[in-house]
Image (spheres, helix red, strand yellow):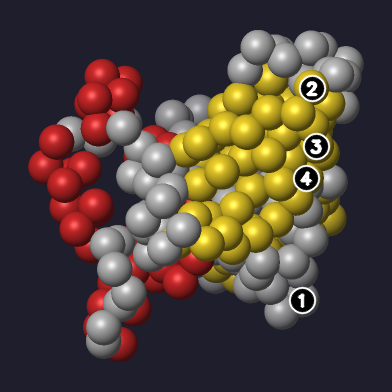
């Protein structure tokens, strides 16, 4: 039995605590934030960036520009219009809130959906090795709501944090394995994809996927 763990290591700041997640890129930075109130702000988002000898204000539409979304294949037109309608305005019922929460979970593990919603953005053209500070706000009704701050230095992206303390417990017809959830600076593991192969066979993805570990004991636990 061979089990492989692949990481979805770019977390959303759903708990609204601490710095916003950010990853360096070779000439910029990728930032992730959340939808305040599970709704698309009517004025989109603003990123206030300082560093490299200049202060810059960037605007990110919510949802992102439709032509760009379609051109890059992040979503098709029907999906774009569906998500735009689903996240417009304040949720009016518990059913609506649950539906939006489930879709936000999808956005955690689907970077194309997150980009289309305007909550995942890559800033480029920056100086390698220079630290840049960001303050991200949502604009609703002309007012700003701060979502968080972060500092990132463009360069080679760090490797995804590797789970440790992997342990297997074999039982008749099944196996239980546990591991320690890994958290790094400005990033944490959102979910895991678990693959299994038998003998020399091809590793197959275990379903349902991905697997979201419990936060209760900071440990992943899965029985197959």
Q: Nearer the viewer, mark 3 or mark 2?
A: 2
Q: Nearer the viewer, mark 4 or mark 1?
A: 4
Instruction: For the residues labelled 3 and 2, say whether their Cβ atoms are less than 8 Å apart.
Output: no
Measure the C-alpha gap from mark 4 to mark 3: 6 Å
Q: Earlier in the sequence, mark 3 or mark 1?
A: 3
The secondary element bearing badge 2 is classed as strand
Q: Earlier in the sequence, mark 4 or mark 1?
A: 4
Q: Name the residue that disc number 1 marks.
A: 217
Measure the C-alpha gap from mark 3 to mark 1: 32 Å
Seen as rendered, the residue at the extreme front is: 142
Q: Earlier in the sequence, mark 1 or mark 2?
A: 2
The secondary element bearing badge 3 is classed as strand
Instruction: For the residues labelled 4 and 3, say whether their Cβ atoms are less than 8 Å apart.
Output: yes
Q: Is residue 121 left or right of residue 81?
A: right
Q: Earlier in the sequence, mark 4 or mark 3?
A: 3
Q: Name the residue that disc number 4 marks.
A: 150
* Residue drawn at x 16%, y 47% as measured from the top left: 81
Q: Is residue 65 visible?
A: yes
Q: Quadrant of residue 49?
A: top right
Measure the C-alpha gap from mark 1 to mark 2: 43 Å
Instruction: For the residues labelled 4 and 1, say whether their Cβ atoms are less than 8 Å apart.
Output: no
Q: How many marks?
A: 4
Crowd around label 1: few <14 · some 14–19 · many ≥20 (10 Å):
few
Q: Name the residue that disc number 2 marks.
A: 54
Q: Earlier in the sequence, mark 2 or mark 4?
A: 2
The secondary element bearing badge 4 is classed as strand
Q: Nearer the viewer, mark 1 or mark 2?
A: 2
Q: Considering the image in quadrants, where does the N terminus appear?
A: top right
Residue 193, relative to residue 76: is it above or below? below
Measure the C-alpha gap from mark 2 to mark 4: 17 Å
Q: Name the residue that disc number 3 marks.
A: 133
* Residue drawn at x 75%, y 58% as measured from the top left: 181
């Amino acid at each position: 039995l061979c089990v492989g763990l692949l990481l979805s290591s770019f977390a959303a700041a759903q708990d609204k605590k601490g710095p916003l997640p950010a990853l360096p890129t070779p000439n910029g930075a990728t930032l992730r934030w959340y939808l305040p109130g599970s709704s698309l702000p009517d004025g989109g988002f603003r990123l206030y960036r300082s560093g490299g000898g200049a202060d810059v204000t960037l605007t990110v539409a919510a949802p992102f520009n439709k032509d760009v979304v379609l051109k890059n294949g992040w979503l098709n037109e029907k999906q774009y219009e569906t998500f735009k309608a689903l996240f417009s305005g304040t949720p009016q019922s518990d059913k609506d809130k649950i539906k939006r929460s489930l879709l936000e979970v999808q956005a955690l593990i689907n970077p194309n959906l997150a980009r289309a919603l305007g909550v995942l953005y890559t800033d480029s053209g920056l100086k390698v090795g220079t630290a840049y500070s960001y303050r991200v706000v949502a604009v609703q009704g002309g007012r700003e709501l701060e979502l968080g701050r972060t500092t990132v230095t463009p360069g080679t992206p760090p490797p995804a944090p590797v789970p440790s303390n992997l342990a297997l417990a074999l039982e008749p017809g099944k196996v239980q394995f546990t591991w320690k959830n890994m958290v790094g600076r400005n990033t944490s593991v959102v979910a895991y994809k678990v693959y299994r192969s038998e003998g020399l066979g091809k590793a197959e993805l275990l379903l349902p996927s991905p697997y979201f570990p419990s936060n209760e004991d900071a440990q992943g636990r899965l029985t197959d």
